[in-house]
Structures are given as C-alpha cells and as structure tokens.
Image: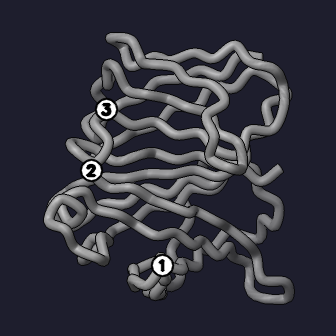
Amino acid sequence: MILDGYIKDKYNQPVEQAVVELKNNSFETLFTACTDTEGYYRFDIPAGYYPFFFAVKGYKESGLEYWCQDIVLDEDLQLDAKIDTLEVYGLHCFTVKGAANGLMVYFRPMALDKYLKGCQDIAPDDIHLQVTVDGNRCPVVNMNKVIEYAGAHPMTAWLIQVSTDKRENWHKVDVEIWDENGNYGAASVFNN
C-alpha cells in the first residue's frame, strides 16, 4: 500500500528534509521517510493498522511534531500535514452517549518557546483553534481547560466540545491551533 503526502509549514511552503515516521503502540519506529525539496514523502508498506504517524523538522530546536493516530491502511492514502512550533499532543475524540449532537476533543498543546525557556507547563498561554470532522469545519460549543499530570508536573490540556450537525459516525478529525503570536500546530485522528 502507498501512504504518501506533503509536509508544509504554516505558510503552506514545502518543508524539505522533514522526518516522517510510522510507529507502533510502544512508540517504536516501524518505517521512516524523509521529505524531498517539494516536501513530499512516500511509504510503500504492507496494509494494516498503524497507531502513530508523525512529521517533524528540527525537533525541540526549531519545531515540534504533527501527529496522526489510528491509521488503518487498507487502500492507498494521501496524508498531508503542516508543522511549526506548536504541537497538538495526545489527541482523542469521543461522543457522550445520550448527550447533544457533538464530539468531545481532548488534547494537550505544547509550545516550543516555553520548552526552550524551561517551563514545566509548556502549553501556550492562549489558543485559537479550528476543528474539522471529515473535512467539515465544526463550531466550537465549549472549551474547558484541564490540568493533566505528566509525572509530578501539572500541564495544561483542553477538552473541547464541537457541534457535528447530527453526524454520529466520523472518519477523521483534524485539529489546528494558533497561539497569540501566530505560532501553529496540528494533529489528526482516524476513527475506524
């Protein structure tokens, strides 16, 4: 099966020499690729389940990662991503049975500038976001700041409720975030 796509920056410019990897549930690397001058990468790999995909250039120095989770590769797939200095980590989506039409979206944002300053909580101070479900932009109903403990350190996470216009089944959710300085991060998750 072919898994390919383009890695770009927040200005939609190709990112050359970005590292793209597929990982198993233990975060062990299964396959690695590197983008060309056009930001293009390509895997020719067996069909199957791939829990984690990430793309990055200059990790912890000039950039953070884009993550995609729960890829079931049963046909060729194009997966494009954008990377910058924010990261949307631990993205999970779920519905609450019997509740209003909507989707709950959980993630922990990270900011490279806070990491480089040695802050314990490396979440951006303020975020703006866009959530799309199967390519359709969804209105944000509510944003709840959550404290998650990573070891002994509290870190800021978000639990977001979005309206999905009565769609109960979804295939892919994309989350994009921006901080007050225009720094960008994104992640995606499939529902198979």
Name the amino acid, label 3: Asn
Query: Which residue is rendered at x = 85% and y = 88% of the image?
Result: 98
**Figure check: 170 above or below 139:** above
**Badge 1 local density, few (<14 within 10 Å), some, or many (20+)?**
few
Q: Earlier in the sequence, mark 1 or mark 3?
A: 3
Mark 1 vs mark 3: in front: 1
Q: Nearer the viewer, mark 2 or mark 3?
A: 2
Residue drawn at x 52%, y 47% as measured from the top left: 67
* Residue at point 62%, 55% (across, down): 173
In primary-sequence order, the first of circles 2 and 3 is 3
The secondary element bearing badge 1 is classed as: loop
Residue 56, quarter of picture: top left
Asked if marks 1 and 3 touch (Cβ < 8 Å), the reply is no
For label 1, the residue is 151
- Sequence-first disc among 1 and 2: 2
Where residue 107 appears, as percent x and y from the top left, is 52, 69
What residue did someone put label 2 on?
85
- Asked if the residues shown at circle 1 and circle 2 are in contact, with their CB atoms under 8 angstroms apart, the answer is no
| Quadrant in which the N terminus appears | top right
Q: Amino acid at mark 1?
A: Gly
Q: Nearer the viewer, residue 146 or 181?
A: 146
Mark 2, other Cα within 10 Å: few <14 / some 14–19 / many ≥20: many
Q: Please name the residue that numbered disc 3 is placed on.
A: 12
Q: CA distance from mark 2 to mark 3?
A: 14 Å
